[in-house]
Image (tube, rainbow, N blue to C red):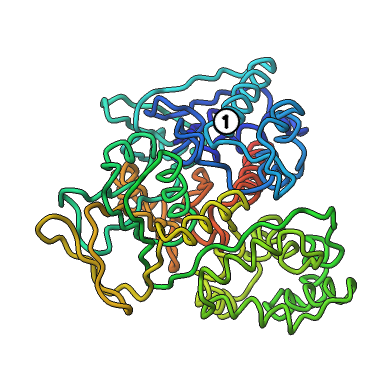
Amino acid sequence: MHIAIIGAGAAAVGLLDALAVSEAGMGVGEVTVFEPSAYLWRGRPYAPDLDSVLVNAPPAIMSIRHLDPGHYASWLGTERAAAHLDGLLGQPLVPRALYGEYLADTAEAALAVLRGRGWRTRVVAARVVAAARSGGGLRLKLRTEDGRAHPADRVVLCVGGGMPQDHYGLGGAPGFVGDPYPLAYRLGQVPAAADVAVIGSGLTAVDVVVSLAARGHAGRIALVSRSGMLPHVWQRPLGHRPAHVTVERVEALCREHGGVTLDDLAGLLRAELAAEGEDFARFTAELLAAGSEEPVGRLRRQLAAVDDPRIGRRVLQETAHTVGPYAWRLLPEPDRERLRRHFRLATSMASPMVPVNAAALLRLFESGQLTMTAGVRKIEAVEGGFRVRGDGGDLNAGVVVNAVNPPPRAVPRAAEPLVTCLLADGLAALHPSGGLVPADPRLYVVGDLAGGGPFITSGIPGVAAAGARTVRGLLATHTG
């Protein structure tokens, strides 16, 4: 079997690792990875950047090896873990570039294992722009941008996510930074005394603010967004192992009821909290209040609650990544739509900021250098800079940094020619809620672009699970 993997980010690493550790045999085959970037295996999120750009999660949910939560921590080792310990969280939080090294090492180790089994492996530094059936429809033929053809028996798209959208049409305006990454380069173009407006209030916006401060930025900084909602703050892990909110319990519910509903999942969380003497109604009321609570006060309260012994948020944050991708596939569409209506709150909870960044934000808020402007309706380029129009009045800035998150399941710009070709040839179709669905059994999609994929698309556990699931499919079709 000749497997072609298009893209070489975290999704490709999870796939290769799952292929390398799979117990079922596939005989001897070939793997070709297509990736034009110089930073193999890292993708956009984990490319070399400032040390202030941290991995926003503890090691236990950053393992790219499915069902092995200790894999990343083992690679990190005690010395590096100690050097990057977040005293508030009690966990190592490394720069994303270092996590990129982990992904690269894991990928290279997986390729070495495959070569040891007699597989041929190669990396082609070219972008795939087209795909078509060939060999009487028995194989697929890929075409790279240099015009060369590459046959394959199975093709896996691991092309990553889309780019931030320019909601206010500021592209080309002097002083507008359309994509903040890599911050080491983008922020180097921002004058140290400039007043900066950062569009967004999620994790990317937090990265921008913290990195500006780390570089000694002297100008005022404003977070400007429609919601004004900051991410939650990670709490110190307590070692609690969920007994009710687990994949096994979700599987049991599915067998008993012929499916799983959102109310079923809420019942599992209610039982989890009740076992610890915690009130489900109180927890959900606190959670829903995040949409209306004053953001700085909420930040201060959550930072003070890093050691709070209650398990509610911890369970929800962990299981959103470990159980969520599986449960999402079982939910009926009306329940999925209920969750989508709370997308901003859900991502704020499931993808919190690390305490060290939360503390940095709070210091900037309390010093007056950082402010929050919510209810933003319009941002326009004016003479000498930009004007932000929000519910609290107008704000002027010399630089605007676009830190909005890309829409889930958006097609990356670099993959647009290939996706257009797949759709035109009937090899894939668009999912009603976004993303790509294979229409040919030889095509797979792993990662953010997967249509019908998990609600939280960027979590490493979900990516690792999808990679392992795809390998099972490859093995089944090969042996079948």
**Vertical placement of residue 437 versus 56, above or below:** below
**In the depicted view, which residue is nearer to us: 343 or 118?**
343
- Quickly name the residue at label 1: 98
Residue in view at x 58 percent, y 43 percent: 55
Residue 245 lies, in percent from the top left, at 79, 66
| Residue extending farthest left | 383
Q: Quadrant of residue 378?
A: bottom left
Image quadrant where one finds the N terminus: top right
Q: Secondary structure at mark 1?
A: helix
Sort mark 1 into few (<14), some (14-19) or many (20+) by Cα contacts within 10 Å. Answer: many
**Vertical placement of residue 60 versus 349, above or below:** above
Q: How many marks?
A: 1
Answer whether residue 429 is visible to the viewer in this image: no
Image quadrant where one finds the C terminus: top right
Residue 415 lies, in percent from the top left, at 34, 43
Residue in view at x 66 percent, y 57 percent: 234
Q: Quadrant of residue 388?
A: bottom left
Residue 136 left/right relative to 190? right
Disc 1 residue type (three-letter): Leu
Residue in view at x 59 percent, y 47 percent: 463
**In the depicted view, which residue is nearer to us: 106 or 167?**
167
**Vertical placement of residue 442 versus 304, above or below:** above
Residue 271 lies, in percent from the top left, at 84, 75
Answer whether residue 257 is visible to the viewer in this image: yes
Residue 213 left/right relative to 172? right
Residue 35 left/right relative to 466? left
Residue 111 lies, in percent from the top left, at 61, 22
